[in-house]
Each structure stands twice: as structure tokens, then as C-alpha cells.
Image (tube, rainbow, N blue to C red):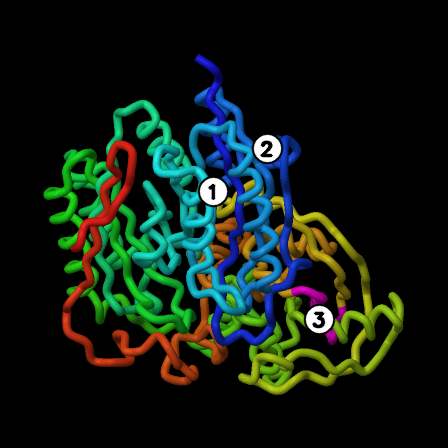
Amino acid sequence: MAKRQVLTGGIAQESHSFNPIVTRRERFTIVEGQGAIEHNRGANSAFGGVIDSAYEAGLDLIVPTLFRAQSGGPVDDLVFAEVSEIMVAAAKRGDFDAIVLPLHGGMLTETLSDPEGLLVERLRAIVGNEVPITAAFDLHAHVKESTLEPLDFLSGYLTNPHEDQSATAKRAFRAAMGILDGTFDPVLAATFLPMLTLGNDTTLSGPLVDIHAYAHNAVERGLAWDVSIFNSQQFLDVPSIGQTVLAYGNGEIDEARKVANEVMKMIWDYRDDLITKYPTLEEQLKDIEQSDRPIIIGDQGDRVAAGSPGDSTYILNYLLENKINVDTYFPIYDPDAVATCDRAGVGGEICLNFGGKYSSASPSVTAKGKVVSLGANVPVLYDGPSDRGTKTYIEKYAVFKIGNISVLLTNQPYSYMDPDYFKAVGLDPEKATIIVSRSGYHFQLNFAKIGHVVTVDTPGMSSYYLDQLPWQHARPFYPLDKIEYEPRQYTRRRLAGGCRSIPG
Ligand SMILES: [Zn+2]
């Protein structure tokens, strides 16, 4: 038998409807071909999981392209069109047995509310119903009927903060191989509820521990072949936003349907517990001058990891107003300020205005300081565990020092999910007293070895005060609106020679 081949690639990003900065091509890390495979082997990313599965199975991968960007505003339509065309052209060339896609599932483009579904639909239209198409999504994906219709199987991360990206893609890969081998006949029971989780949605403690334990047990007992629980990204202003539970049976659906329904009922029953408030900045910084261990603060209101702009000055203004002058690394997105520092040069002492152009939570900062370093295209390698092995880079940066505060200005927004972002620009995380991250969950895993990690309740576009956002399409949803417990149901069966959906 000829060696099997699998087509992979696509585009992955998480969008924030209310961030006005369109995510353009320059924000993507673009890889393709054999180089991409070698570069990402062993990485704890969904793409890394596809690669490792292919090596384990001894088969070849075709990677026409993979665009990946950090979260941000909706993606430029032209970028999505470019990726679609490359993937469609590869699908037309054929010569593969299955398609396995490492996507995010929470992406928007300027005009599309389900680009992932559309990409898969286009591929399906070319390869027909015989070729299995499976995908791995982030736990924060917004999964709906149009996403599921063209997919034979979808798996989602089971951890938040995410530490099972590779394992999730391995499940998607295994499903595709099972379909080819005739050992897996996926029958999907999906259920959807217009409800958001806000704050108590880690899988390390609280309600999601019990919910995931129930799902895991159902898989162990053979009641379902696979179960995924998607707690949607909260900042997608699209219709039918909310929770999605998928349970796949192998050939039969009754038990899987019961599992999906039970998991959704648990989410609903825990709805009030899934909402919580974070500690305040004041509480966290009250004894900071006596602290002998770094504190790493997630700026909840301006999380680039959730698609926020990354230019909120709130925490910095708090430090300046309260005269907290300890060694601090404060990252902020401001391309104009980077250019100003560049003109002043290293050693230049200037009065600089920066930040607060998109985030309106706090005014921009104007302060005297010194440009201590400048650089461009410095590589960043995630030590993990979250996204361990991810290789990216900081495009242009300047470190501007105000007293003991090192302001890391960049011309692109970054999530600062891993200590290596600071190491890459010569700021040793071990030597700081305060480090600010623009992530809410994942940085906690990666910075735990450095010091005390905490996400604080700051205002901004990614805070959980959802009533302050200008929703147009997503409502009604819990908790902003009173809703009844009436989950939507969806069923999909893959039939020999064809796939079709069964009215739920
Ligand atoms: Zn996520």
C-alpha cells in the first residue's frame, strides 16, 4: 500500500469584535512545506501535534501554508482569501488521503463570522465526502452548525490555561486515521447554549474540574468516543455566541447525545459559579516594596491574548500616581513611540507620550525617561508549558526607562504569555519586582517558575464588564440577558459515500 499523505495548514487567530485594529498580514507568522514541519516538530501547538502524529504514523504531510497570529481585531479579508486560495489549490492537486486542520475556531474576518467553517466548506466542495476532514480548535472557539457541517470530526483543547494543544490535534489526527481504517464512524451530538463563562473558567479548579471529569469518565466508559467543551471567546459580537458541547459516538449516537446533554446541563447549573471577579491592583501591590519575589500581573482589561489592543496605560498610571518605583517591566503597543525612541537613539533622554490610543480605560502617559535599548526582529522561543516550542519574534521595539520602570514599547501588540518575550529584549524576568503580561490565563503557567502570578481586575476592552460593550448581534445571552434553558441541538452523521446532517 502506498504511504498515506495528509494535507494540513490553514489560518489560526482569535478575534475580538470590538478591537478596531484589523489584523493584517504582517501580524502573521507564515510557514509552509518541509521547513514548517521540521521547525514545529515537538512543539506543544496544534500544528506540532499534527506533525508528531504524522511521524508516529510514518506518513507524509503536505503543508501548503499555515498563517498564525496572536489574538487581535478581525482579520483582513484579503489575508483570509489568500490562505483559502492556497489551501483550495492544494486540495485541487489532490494526492492525499485526509485533511487535518490546526485552527483556532474563534476567528472573524472583516466580513465573515465563521471563516473556519467557510474554509472547510471550500475544501469539502473539492475533495467530496470520501476524504475525511478533521480539525483541532482552541477551547475558546465559537463553534456553530455551519462550522460542524463540513467537518467529519472536531476536537477542542480540554485545558484552560491551555496545555494540551498538541494532544488535541493528535485526537483529530487519530479520528481521521480511524475513518480511513474503517474503525471510526463519527456520529456527532452537538449542543449549543447562548451563555458565557466569565472569570471562573479555568480547568484547574472550580466547576470546570467536575464538568471535565464527567466528560472524561464518559469517554473512559465508552459512552462517547470523544467529548469537547467549548467555552467561547467572550468578545465575539456574532449571532448565537456561547457554549458548545460535542460528543462523538462511534457508529451510534444515543449514549453520546446523553453525554452532550448532561455536560451542557452541568454548565448551565454552574452558570453563576462560572462568573467571578479578579483581585484589584491595589490589593496585589500594597506590600510590593517589601516583596522579594517578582509578581507577574495579567492585565485583565487589556489582554492581547483575548484580542485587546495592548496599549492600555492603566497599570503604569497606577504605578506612577502611587509613586511605586520598583523594578518593573511594562510592555505596551505604540508604533509611533517606538519611532520616536528610534530617532532619539540609545542613550537619548526625551519626554515621550505613549499608549492609550485604542484603550480608553486610562489616558496616555507623558513622561521623561531614557531610551536604553532598541532592536528589531528578535526571536522569541516559548519555554512553556503553554505553547512550549512556539517560535515567534518581536518586530520593532524600544526599552524606555522611567525611574526603575522599563517600558517595553513595540510596533506590534504581543500577549507576553512567556518570559522569553522579556529575555529576548535583554530584560531578565528574574530581576524584576513587577512584570506586566497582556494575558489572563496562559502566562500563569509559563511565569509560575519566575514568581507569583495573578490576573487583576483592570478596566478595558477585555474586562468582563460586558455590559459596557456595544453589542449588536450576539444578544441575548447569559449573563447579560435572562434566558431560558433551551439548548439548540445538532446531529451529524458521516455516511459511506456521503455525509449529511440529521434534523436535531
Ligand atoms: Zn483559548
- Residue in view at x 31 percent, y 78 percent: 475
Residue beneath disc 1: 46
Q: Residues within 10 Å of mark 3 (few under 14, many from 20)?
A: few
Residue beneath disc 3: 404
Where residue 494 sits in the image (x, y, percent)?
26, 39
Where residue 436 sits in the image (x, y, percent)?
57, 66
- Badge 1 element: helix
Residue 73 position by quadrant: bottom right
Q: Is residue 127 left or right of 175 when viewed as pictured? A: right
- Badge 2 element: helix
Where residue 99 sits in the image (x, y, percent)?
44, 36
- Residue in view at x 55 percent, y 50 percent: 84
User: Which numbered disc covers residue 37?
Assistant: 2
Q: Residues within 10 Å of mark 1 (few under 14, many from 20)?
A: many
Between the residue at mark 2 and the residue at mark 3, the CA separation in whole angstroms equals 43 Å
- Residue in view at x 51 percent, y 62 percent: 305
Q: Nearer the viewer, mark 3 or mark 1?
A: 1
The overriding secondary structure of the stretch rendered in magenta is strand
Q: Which residues are magenta?
A: 400-412
- Image: 392 above or below 74: above
In the picture, the quarter occupied by the N terminus is: top left
Which of these two is toward me, 105 or 355? 105
Q: Earlier in the sequence, mark 1 or mark 2?
A: 2
- Asked if residue 284 can be seen in this view, the reply is yes
Q: Earlier in the sequence, mark 2 or mark 3?
A: 2
